[in-house]
Image (cartoon, rainbow, N blue to C red):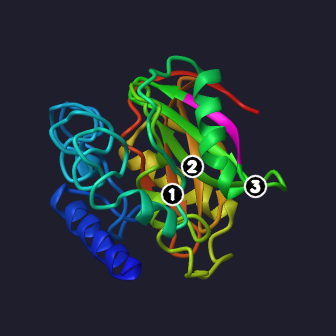
Amino acid sequence: MVGALAAAVIALVASAAVAAGTLGGPSSGPWTTRGYGEGSYASMMGRQDRGPSAGMMGGQGQGPYAGMMGSQGQEPYAGMMGRSMMGSMGMVWLPGDGVAVSSIPAARVRAASAAKTAGLHPGEVMWFDNGFYVELKDSAGKPATEIIVDPRTGAVSTEPGPAMMWNTRFGMMRADGGRAGLVNSMKARGIATSWLTANRPGTTIKSIDAYPGYFTLDLQHNGVVSGMMSVNSSTGAAWYHTWHGAFIAMEDN
């Protein structure tokens, strides 16, 4: 059942990417998204309006990732991809406790609670106006997956996009070892640079981290963090993260 659900979600994401006017590659492939519209989490991960993650990855604009991946914004991925499904797919999640998260230390505490059962711990934490992004590391200190902390409720979930779809240890494709090594960090930088030149002129790479099955790059514009993107380590497909919003602060650990 989990495998069928994963396949269905992947098909939905792919079809939504095409409908949203996405770019692939830097020049081909279905996974790169430009983002459009006015609302947070616009484009494939949302709608043009109505707030965080409205649209395919959200519903009614009531909270991050509500809708198909959630339920009325009460916690990420409740509903179709509920608690048991998230756990059986190997993804990280923690229900919200209704307490607002308004600082990096508080987000780190929530992330640590969610990551504990998977044997992971928080590394880099980035605060955006749509919520908190947290890098999770394994016991050896290597990046393992990426999560989002909802600032309104404290709910924690695996980040949508590459962490969910490409991660070969803690995502839907974890059973697929992929063709690791076909794209190394140097090639990933080249792919990202080409895509940024074509689609985000003036944006450069700040740093790059290797996750199971893909790389994630922190981006900067005029020396200020401006967003993130990922590159698949087996196909070279690029995926720009449209869902974070404006950068506020960060802390690495």
Q: Which mark is residue 146?
A: 2
Q: Is residue 70 shown left or right of residue 174?
A: left
Question: Magenta: predominant secondary structure element?
Answer: strand
Reading the image, the residue beneath label 1 is: 163
Q: Which quarter of the figure is the N terminus placed in? A: bottom left
Q: Count the numbered circles shown.
A: 3
Dots 3, 2 in contact, CB < 8 A: no
Q: Is residue 191 magenta?
A: no
The secondary element bearing badge 2 is classed as strand
Residue type at tag 2:
Glu
Residue type at tag 3:
Asp
Would residue 208 be seen by someone viewing this image from the given angle? no
The secondary element bearing badge 1 is classed as helix
Dots 1, 2 in contact, CB < 8 A: yes
Give the mark nearer the N terminus: 1 vs 2: 2
Magenta stretch: give its range.
Answer: 121-126
Q: Which mark is residue 138?
A: 3
